[in-house]
Amino acid sequence: MTDLVLSESLAAARTRLAEALNATERPADAARLLAVSKTKPAAMIREAWHLGQREFGENYVQEALDKQAELTELDPIVWHFIGPLQSNKTREVAEHFSWVHSVDREKIARRLNDQRPEALGPLNICLQVNISEETSKSGVSLEALPALAEAILAMPALRLRGLMTIPAPAEGREAQRVPFARLREAFEALRERFPEAPLDTLSMGMSADLEAAVQEGATLVRLGTAIFGERNTR
Ligand SMILES: *Cc1c(COP(=O)(O)O)cnc(C)c1O
């Protein structure tokens, strides 16, 4: 991928998002781009930042901390943790990220709540939902979602912002829309059930299915390959 021109791929990703929003008559600012930089060097994040990208998603705690340490001059920058989170890594995430998209159980949430430094303000949380109900995948089930949301809403150092999902791969727009529509319905049901909650985020859509996700109401699309090219091996 040495021939990737980041300015071009980032511009293309922005155009793609703008066109997807326009196609469903949603406002141009109704969804934003999260640049997923896992396996990519700090230098590429710096370059994207200088091109105006501010929000970055990382999946691996140590890799993210190493890059963050190299990029302290980039301000403002917003780090999202989007990978599977083990309890022995919650402290680093609570101390070094603004968002976590992959919370799917109360134990992890409680640790993040207890470990969040007060000076940083509340940690923004999306609950990862196992929408395709594959037993091997992480994510809370739709049945267990309201109880988990209620528990998290009572945690003062966390701010529950919405839902995230990684659906099973599907071919074609119509098939891709099905799980995203299901997540949107779950999101709307949560907003009705907890009208006081700051629920404003539907984190869904990746390089292969951005358009379907935007059509179903995504407010944050997570693009890796489309911006940074094929992932490096770790
Ligand atoms: C890697 C990753 C992405 C980006 O995937 P692409 O297909 O490269 O756009 C998005 N979300 C999560 C949770 C990821 O792990």
Image (cartoon, rainbow, N blue to C red):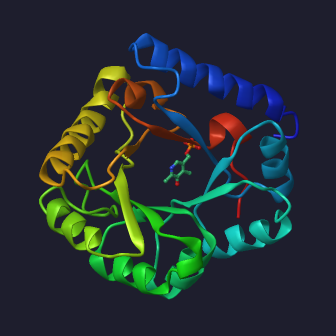
Q: Nearer the viewer, residue 153 or 23?
A: 153
Q: Residue at x 46, y 29 (%)?
A: 30
| Residue 187 drawn at (x, y percent) | 24, 45
Q: Residue at x 74, y 29 (%)?
A: 9
Residue 201 sits in quarter: top left
Is 48 left or right of 20, judged from the image as shown? right
| Residue 75 drawn at (x, y percent) | 78, 56
Relative to residue 55, is residue 220 depicted above or below?
above
Relative to residue 38, is residue 67 depicted above or below?
below
Relative to residue 28, is residue 138 depicted above or below?
below
Q: Is residue 229 visible?
A: no
Q: Residue at x 51, y 63 (%)?
A: 83
Q: Is residue 52 visible?
A: yes
Is 142 left or right of 118, judged from the image as shown? left
Relative to residue 14, is residue 102 depicted above or below?
below
Q: How many marks?
A: 0
Q: Quadrant of the N terminus?
A: top right
Is 37 left or right of 85, judged from the image as shown? right
| Residue 42 drawn at (x, y percent) | 82, 58
| Residue 177 drawn at (x, y percent) | 30, 29
Q: Nearer the viewer, residue 164 or 194?
A: 194
Residue 24 sits in quarter: top left
Is 2 left or right of 178, judged from the image as shown? right
Q: Quadrant of the C terminus?
A: bottom right
Residue 212 sits in quarter: top left
